[in-house]
Image (spheres, helix red, strand yellow):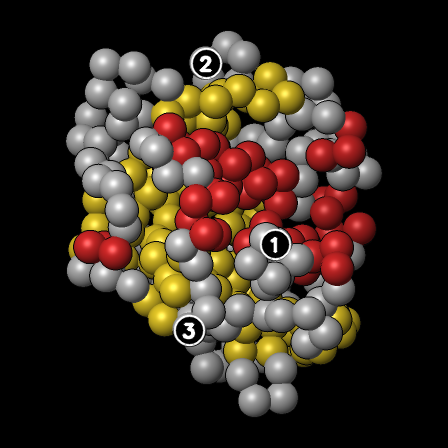
Amino acid sequence: MDKPSNLLWTEEFMVHASDTDFQSRGKLSFLLDIMQRAADSAVSSLGLSIDKMLEARMGWMVITLNLDIHRLPLSNEILNVHTWSKGNKGALWQRDYRIFDENAVEIASARSIWALVDIDKRKILRPSALPITVEPYLEDSVGSLPDKVLIPADVLMEEAYRYQVRYSGLDNNGHLNNARYVDLCCDALTLEEWEVWRISGLQITYAQEATYGENFSILRSSWTEKGVYVRGQGEDRIFFEAYLKLEN
């Protein structure tokens, strides 16, 4: 952590075998997991732990995330996650991330938009509802606010499989965890596709929170110029839309 300013948080994570895929590369959801954990630690360091937020019936809800990947980590690597708040614009907060390997080489970076919400009413809260002050860190920036994913109307989406939210996917708010959505996206591709293509990025927009027992379709596009679109869709609503950036 940057002790003088207390605005830049850094945290180390080890890549365990359970965090990797069939090619011994860190799963995409693992990257989101460690970013989420680092962000939680950063806010806790300011005096607002997850327990205190739950007591106040408040929580953070990610709206959109844009992740650029130079390479996926390997088993037993030590990663260093840097994260900082870029402040808020109205009711929306921006948080940036950079992930470095043991040699201080950046392997990934991300921009994200979050909202503070009332857990019970599921309503977005004004920044003034936050009982602490979160000052922006201005010494670095991954980029501007990420755009929401918009799947073009002419892109054909076909069902890859169906998914039902179970215990293993829930977070401490009782909703499908942010990182688990990314597993759903990755599962829409075949092993043969993963063997041929390298993931270089992810864009995902969370449109609706999924709760225990909800059943919905995971739709995917055929190959576009740079990747594959994925959507989680129920009978009457869309849960998320994403774009997996892929290279060979």
Give the label, 2 or 1, closer to the camera. 1
Give the label, 3 or 2, closer to the camera. 3
Direction bottom: furthest residue? 236
Distance from Cα at disc 2 to Cα at disc 1:
31 Å
Q: Position of residue 153 (x, y in %)?
A: 46, 82
**Residue hosting label 2:** 104
SS type, badge 3: loop
Q: Which residue is at the front of the view, 40 or 65?
A: 40
Residue lying at 34% horizontally and 33% vertically, measured from the top left: 47
**Residue hosting label 3:** 121
> Is residue 107 toward the left or the right of residue 127 in the image?
right
Residue lying at 33% horizontally and 43% vertically, measured from the top left: 95
Name the amino acid type tagged 1.
Asp
Name the amino acid type tagged 2.
Ala
**Residue hosting label 1:** 171
Q: Is residue 238 above or below residue 31?
A: below
